[in-house]
Image: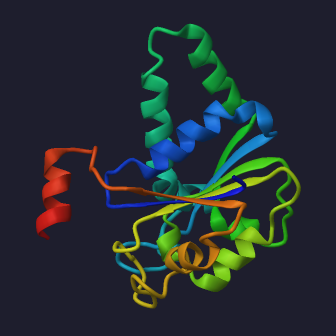
Amino acid sequence: MKLVTIQGNAGTGKTLLALASALEQRKNFRQIYITRPIVPLSNKDIGFLPGDVKTKIDPYMAPIWDNLKFIREQFAGDEKMLFKIDELIRTEKIEIAPLAFIRGRTITKIFFIVDEAQNLTPHEIKTIISRAGEHTKIVFTGDIYQIDTPYLDSESNGLSYLIENAKKHPLYAHITLQKGERSELANLATELL
């Protein structure tokens, strides 16, 4: 499939599964590109943060790095695999960047992961997919019930829009994850709050 959506509650492993899949398929692509929209939890602009652009966006990209670190830890005894993952990062075969940097680009032969896609509008989803060049795969992950922007809801967000409109298309597949894997405490928050 060239277009995949992974939907599930917090802690179900959406980002981890997408990243592990990208690493498994890395030889079919020239780069793994992972991005997410920058939506502060308190809806404050990042401009007020001190530092340069990299310093400002690093906290928003931390969950992706956490997932990559978790995958790396699974290979603790495999020096060859640890070296390979580190080399992919060092040579920028794995690139983690904010979504704002995608406009105007054509992404060719890229395994492209868009995390937290529920915070995107339908127009933004369309813009991202329209960037796809030949031999590109795009995976959108998100939780349609965990919207961090006041302008979207569980039905109007871009991820819901994509799931609804792409179903039955031969280039598209959808996965819904149901079981929380993060912790019992995280599952309690999902179920009760």
| Left or right of 182 on screen, residue 104 | right
Residue in view at x 48 percent, y 88 percent: 156
Residue 33, image x, y percentages: 69, 49
Residue situated furthest bottom in the rendering: 151
User: How many marks overall?
Assistant: 0
User: Splitting the image into 4 quarters, where does residue 74 fall?
Assistant: top left
Residue 190, image x, y percentages: 20, 63
| Left or right of 23 on screen, residue 115 | left
Residue 163, image x, y percentages: 54, 72
Near-viewer residue (174 or 52): 174
Colouring convention used in this rendered image of the protein = rainbow
| Left or right of 106 on screen, residue 189 | left
Does 28 sit above or below residue 58?
A: above
User: Splitting the image into 4 quarters, where does residue 91 fall?
Assistant: top right
Image quarter where the C terminus lies is bottom left
Near-viewer residue (163 or 78): 163
Residue in view at x 73 percent, y 77 percent: 127
Residue in view at x 42 percent, y 32 percent: 70
Residue 152, image x, y percentages: 45, 87
Does 59 sit above or below residue 101?
A: above
Residue in view at x 48 percent, y 59 percent: 60
Does 10 sit above or below residue 96?
A: below
